Image (spheres, rainbow, N blue to C red):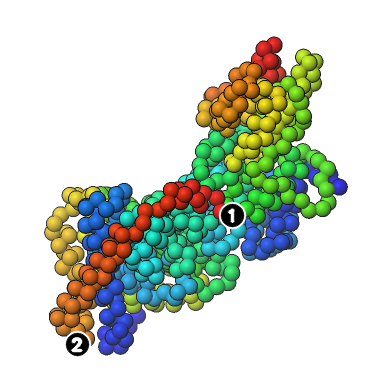
Amino acid sequence: MAKKKTEDYDPELLISMYKDMLLYRRFEESANRAYNKGKFAGFCHLHIGQEAVCVGVQKNLQESDYVLSGYRSHTQSIAKGIEPQKVMAELYGKATGCTLGKGGSMHMFSKEKRFLGGHGIVGGQIALATGVGFKIRYDKENDICVCYFGDGAINQGQFYESLNMAATWDLPVLYVIENNQYGMGTNFRRVTSIDHLWKRALAFDMDHSDVDGMNVMSVYDHVGEVIKNIRKTKRPHLLEALTYRYRGHSVSDPATYRSKDELQSYQDKDPIITQGKLLKKQKLVDDETLDKWNKETKAKVKEFEKFADESAEPDHDLAYQHVYAE
Amino acid sequence: MAELTYREALNRAMDEEMSRDDRIYLMGEEVAEYNGAYKVSKGLLDKYGPTRVWDTPISESGFAGLAIGSAMAGLRPIVEMMTWNFGIQAFDHIINHAAKMYYMSGGQFNVPIVFRGPNGPAHMLAATHSQNVEPMLTNIPGLKIVSHSCPYDGLGLLKSSIRDNSPVIFMESELTYGQKQEIPDEEYTIPLGVGEIKKEGKDVTVICWNRMVDLVRRSLEPLEKDGIDIEILDPRTLQPLDEELIFQSVRKTHRVVVVEESWSFASVGAQISDRVQKECFDDLDAPVGRVNLDFVPMPYNEHLEELVSPDVEKVCQAVREVCYL
């Protein structure tokens, strides 16, 4: 694939990628602070460091495409169109949350935006997303389904069961392994027989590739081609995005199982800083503008916090609703 | 009226529903080209084609999850488990996703799906192939559990299950697929959550379902000789349970025996006993009697299998006991 020159891109697109990543970073930092302040409890898995994967993939989607993910999906649900204040309110367990305070951090949903969760059982979304691919095929639609999961999830049996069915039946699913190298505290190399996770696709004769998940333009370009191909062939694709989470597995994990040097080596190629440099190189912005955007984003996130904080607790009736569908 | 076997009745239910609604598809191991391991899906591939009748790989967890995902996106799958013993592989998806999705998404994603297949002991299949999973699944909020005792009920309940907007677990039995019954030619459904008195009686309410209804019927004659007139109550749906019908019957007979083909600990029978003692305490003339599988894995040997399973004598004994005979 010929590398595009940066000047070929719509400047607005380059800027929006930067701004989205910035928003997601500040959003997650806010969630972390709120958790530590006791605004909510439970589990809270932050996406900090992995923003380029989310933005690079989802900027390529059409509205009618579907997205499913695991429990680290605050940013992906916002990228699919759920209003960030509703995601924040969901973290706080409020009635204004995107699942009315019934799902929480790990379980964001929006039927309208076709974000089908937010799933807390590791790997569960892989089979569910395969079923969405099945529906797309059943109805002969032009949509695709994106399914995110981590390097830990690929060792679940249903990963193999699902990829086998998707490859056998030509289901238009983009399976994205966000390889941040650690399934909770376990480096994937300690529990996985291969060094490059995309190789798992070879067993199913499935299209596959990998991409630098720390660079949003690399992800955007590569996934653009991949998705074009999925829409054309209707065949699934296994993508390994090489990325890194700066924080622990969840906010309560100090991540002592890895070195500071390792963390630093990834922070040195931080996706937001990299994209900022690109914008400056393109003379689209200067440092002052970046600083202004940062302040604006922080203010915006404060509004989300305020919305979540001031929203009402769910009525008791809600605990007894939605057990069975009418 | 036509005499249909159990498998033909269930087949007719799927056939009628699939012809009514093209969102419905059938999926499972051997359901298409082989016509079903127990021939329940016979002819459906020919009639509806490979887009709506799917043979799957032997991946119960995977295809259960796939079907649930497709239901979230708008389809209405019927998933055949060749047996519920294999269906245990799919419990992760059934319990974590089918049952919870509507609730956890705040009412956005319901999962209209039927998981159906034979459940409970068959004959000389040993421990891993002779399990009744009803107690495990009735304990999960969000699932409906149907367990029926005759082809007529099976047909009407399967149609309602397919039309239901919540996930339904539909229990069949390997040993009754050949059982015959006269079935009306005109279309009918039986609502979920509504039990039926299969035989009226005045002395003891015997609550039983699925294959146990026939077993209890075989106990009628010896019990008549003892002068005991039992009422046979089939709840037909175990979750939600038709408690009112049970309470009404108990208030009439004042004595209850629950006969179920599963272990007794934390089972449907245990739940019924609890509800009856709570709601009908003053009506009871004896503690609730129970007949269950003995609490051991199912042995292979035919005589040992009979030894640990409910039989006519055990039913009669339990009924006599609540009559203090």
**First in sequence: mark 2 or mark 1?**
2
Q: Chain of mark 1?
A: A
| Residue B9 visible in rendering | yes
**A190 or A33: which is nearer to us?**
A33
The x, y position of residue B208, in whole percent, is: 67, 31
Q: Is residue B322 above or below residue A49?
A: above
Instruction: Give the residue at mark 2.
Output: A283
Q: Residue at x 21, y 52 (%)?
A: A36
Q: Residue at x 48, y 73 (%)?
A: A64
**What's the amino acid at mark 1?**
Glu
Q: Quadrant of residue B289?
A: top right
Give the SS element for disc 1: loop
Quadrant the C terminus of chain B occupies: top right
Q: Is residue B112 above or below residue A54?
A: above
**B105 or B137: which is nearer to us?**
B105
The x, y position of residue A154, in whole percent, is: 38, 55
The x, y position of residue B35, in whole percent, is: 69, 52
The furthest residue to the right: B1
Q: Quadrant of residue A72?
A: bottom left
The x, y position of residue B8, in whole percent, is: 76, 47
Please tell me the numbered disc located at residue A131.
Answer: none
The answer to whether dots 2 and 1 both sit on one chain is yes
Give how far apart the Cα atoms at labels 2 and 1 are.
Answer: 57 Å
**A174 or B190: which is nearer to us?**
B190
Q: Chain of mark 2?
A: A
